[in-house]
Amino acid sequence: MARTAPVSAHAPDDALRARLDAVAGRLLHLARDLHAHPETAFNEHHAADALTTLLADAGLTVERGTAGLPTAFTATAGPSGADLTVGLCLEYDALPDLGHACGHHLIAAAGAGAAIALAAVADDLGLRVKALGTPAEESGGGKVHLLRAGAFDDVSFAMMVHPGPADDFGGTSRASRGVQAEYRGRAAHAAIAPYDGVNAADACVIAQTALALLRQQLPDGVRMHGIVTHGGDRTNVIPALARVSWQLRADTLDELEALWPRVRACFEAGAVATGCELSLTEPAAAYADLRQDAWLGDTYARHVRALGRTPEPAASIGASTDMGNVSHALPAIHPTIGLGCAARPHTAEFAAAAVGEQADRAVLDAALALARTAADLATDPAQRTRITDAHRARSYRPSSAGSPLG
């Protein structure tokens, strides 16, 4: 029989704070250490080692290599028969060249802190705690891999917090899909016999010109942006191989799907005009739009206000996240914890702001607010029933539909 918390139980706030205070030094050391050792998608070995060591030392049961990903993991605590499981999502990948310019080291430390604090009261709450180490949010969709492998099947609701310039909660994100186009032509000497060549770089130029013109007819909120990843090797050789990488964003996956035939035609135009061969690939799974649970978001906001913060409700976070895919499968939140800076993520200035006094405060405030939010849900009979009933009725199966190659 599933174990549940007594209806009269109260959130053991003193115990949560005491446990968090006891590990605060290690959490802040962890955040600074990860910031100093940035690792990109699926290469976060140092981060995974540091996090699993901390969680194991705190008494959680750790399993590495979740979903066959070497840098993914789970760490669990609490009664195995509980009807309610909270999933804390920990991100820790960095950006090439920019390091932790999105603050994922703070996400990891805050999520670990919340998991450790909740583990101390899990038996009293009848709450199972599951920290999920989710690699490759910036590129690769680690959470999508974990969803497809069933790592979220036993999770009733999921939470994480993301750093930003200021505090906010609620809101959605854009759905996102990446596509890579490769053009193959024929090399030739650019001075002696250019007419013998089939110029793959020209195919990229034509495709990107067509995409730029398409922007004029796109709905509000749609974004397209890309780079040339290979355009040739020497100026005196007609390039036989060229590649571009583009990302498409829209309010929903359905909108992206409707957009795709027009985008594909732009890539095909480059091949038709130059005579090159075209191959299109999708480097990672699409990211769904974010759907945040209103009750969880409001409860989190109440707790950060109690810590002296002033979170504002958000309409949209603008960017994209694989937490969106999680939120389509189960109740979830992805609020922003503010660093009190003017810099925006994915800049060198934000990477600099993501370490120091304000970053330290963000880790501890976020960890405590997340832990209190989970404890409140566990001790609220109506909300607990809402979440556990939805979990039992869940029929979500990650879809393979929606590939731009379809």
Image (cartoon, rainbow, N blue to C red):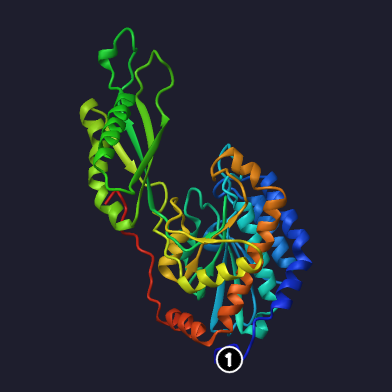
Q: Looking at the image, can residue 356 be seen?
A: yes
Pinpoint residue 198: horizontal percent, then vertical percent.
28, 22
Label 1 residue SS: loop
114 relative position to 228: left or right: right
- The residue closer to the viewer here, 246 or 333, is 333
Q: Is residue 316 left or right of residue 70?
A: left
Residue 350's spot in the image, x, y percent? 60, 43
Q: Amino acid at mark 1?
A: Val
Q: Position of residue 406 (x, y in %)?
A: 26, 52
Residue 75 in sight from this viewpoint: no
Residue at x-position 29% and y-position 30%: 209
Residue drawn at (59%, 71%), measured in percent from left and top?
Answer: 130
Q: Nearer the viewer, residue 96 or 23?
A: 23
> Residue furthest toward the left?
272
Q: Quadrant of residue 324?
A: bottom left
User: Taking 73 as reference, is 96 above or below it?
Assistant: above
The residue to which callout 1 is attached is 7
Quadrant, the N terminus: bottom right
Q: Residue at coordinates 31% horizontally, 39% vertically from top-left?
A: 279
Please indicate whether residue 288 sits to the left or right of residue 5 in the image.
left
Q: Nearer the viewer, residue 19 or 329?
A: 19
Going by the image, does 232 lie left or right of 5?
left
x and y percent of residue 183 in the render?
A: 32, 32
